[in-house]
Structures are given as structure tokens and as C-alpha cells.
Amino acid sequence: MKVFNFAVVAALSLALMSAPAWADANGLNGLQFVDAVSKNDSAKARQLLEANVPGMIDARGSNGDTALIVAINRRDEQWTGFLLLQKADPNLPGKNGDTPLIAAARIGFDQAAEWLMETGARINAANRMGETPLIVAVQQHQSQIARALLQAGADPDKQDSAQGYSARDYAKRDPRARDILQMINNKRPASTR
């Protein structure tokens, strides 16, 4: 399993800490923080974080996504790592109830998925449609993420609420997911471990 690229994250942290503060904390809000992260504006993000507004790191943007989900959706290792090091909640859902781990599974951001699991992401947490990270990984043919989720104990038989299918069911129905189906079938049920 890969670990944080601390050299890259440290460089981003240093850039954030050395940028000048250019505004006071009055009127600052989470929308500005998420916007700064989405625009890769480290000076603005630093200024907002230094204001010590409670909950800033987990604020939601105008579309309901957190800065962590925004960084993941951009496949941005630096911001993803930095936000996790700053204790962004790895389980806080964004729009449609997608957790950061579901977002990583949806786009195949393997490194983020590993970091999220290392920092306490719930591997069976579902979105509003009942999709788990494993179901999404199967649907998107993300074999590496599916393997990591299964190794971490993801439940291949937890059904979604949209279709009533589990990750195992989706893998059976999709001939392009045969490798994932084999991984699922090789996983011993939790009751026999």
C-alpha cells in the first residue's frame, strides 16, 4: 500500500504557510475556502484556515461538495494529501451523498482511496442510492480500488437501494468485471474469518 508522498504534501504545506495573509477573518466562510481549493489558490486557502473558523476544513461549496471531494474529483494528490493531513473528515459526504471514498472509486483515484482508508474512511458507507465504494468500483471497472476495498473488509453482498444489487451482483451482470468478480468470489465471508 502506498503512503502519503510527504515531500509533495510538505511542499504544498510550506507554500501555504509562507504565503502572506491578505484579509481578516471577518465575513469569511466555507464557500470561499472550497472555492480557493477548487481554484488551487493556496494563499486564499491558507488565509481562511488561519482564521481558525471552526469546521472550515470540512466546509461545503455551493454544490454541496467539500474541499476534499473537490480535490479528489480533480485527482489532485497535493490538495487531497494536504486536506487529509489537516484532518478533513474522510467520511463527510458531498452532493448525492457520495463520500470521499465513493468519489475516489468513481474516478479511479487509487492513491486517494488508499489514503482515505488509512485515515479512517468507512469502507461500506453508502450514498443516497445505497451505493457503496465497492459497488461504484465494480460499476466503473476499478479493479485496483476494488481489490483494496475487499482487502480492507468491504462487504460484496451489501445491496444498493436503487436496483437492489450488490457489488457481487453487478460484477456477475457485467462481463467487463470478471476480474473483480473473481476477487469477490475468492473473498471468504466475514462469518468464516
Image (cartoon, grey):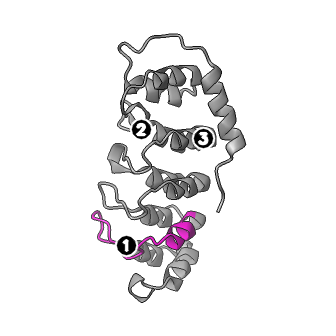
* Total numbered labels placed on residues in the image: 3
Principal secondary structure, stretch drawn in magenta: loop
Q: Percent position (x, y) of residue 79? A: 58, 37
Amino acid at dot 3? Asp
Horizontal arrangement in the rendering, residue 128 relative to residue 57 (left or right) = left
Q: Residue at x 47, y 74 (%)?
A: 171
Q: Nearer the viewer, residue 188 or 184?
A: 188
Q: Which mark is residue 4?
A: none
The answer to which of marks 2 and 1 sits earlier in the sequence is: 2
- In the rendered image, residue 160 lying in the magenta stretch gets the answer yes
Relative to 144, is 159 on the left or the right?
left
Marker disc for residue 166: 1
Per the model, the C-alpha gap separating discs 3 and 2 is: 14 Å
* Residue bearing mark 3: 76
Mark 3 to mark 1: distance in Å?
A: 30 Å
Identify the residue at image location x=57%, y=58%.
114
The image quarter in which residue 124 lies: bottom left
The amino acid marked with disc number 1 is Ser
Q: Residue at x 64, y 21 (%)?
A: 18
Residue at the image position 37 percent from the left and 47 percent from the top? 92
Q: Earlier in the sequence, mark 3 or mark 1?
A: 3
Magenta residue span: 145-165
Q: Earlier in the sequence, mark 3 or mark 2?
A: 2
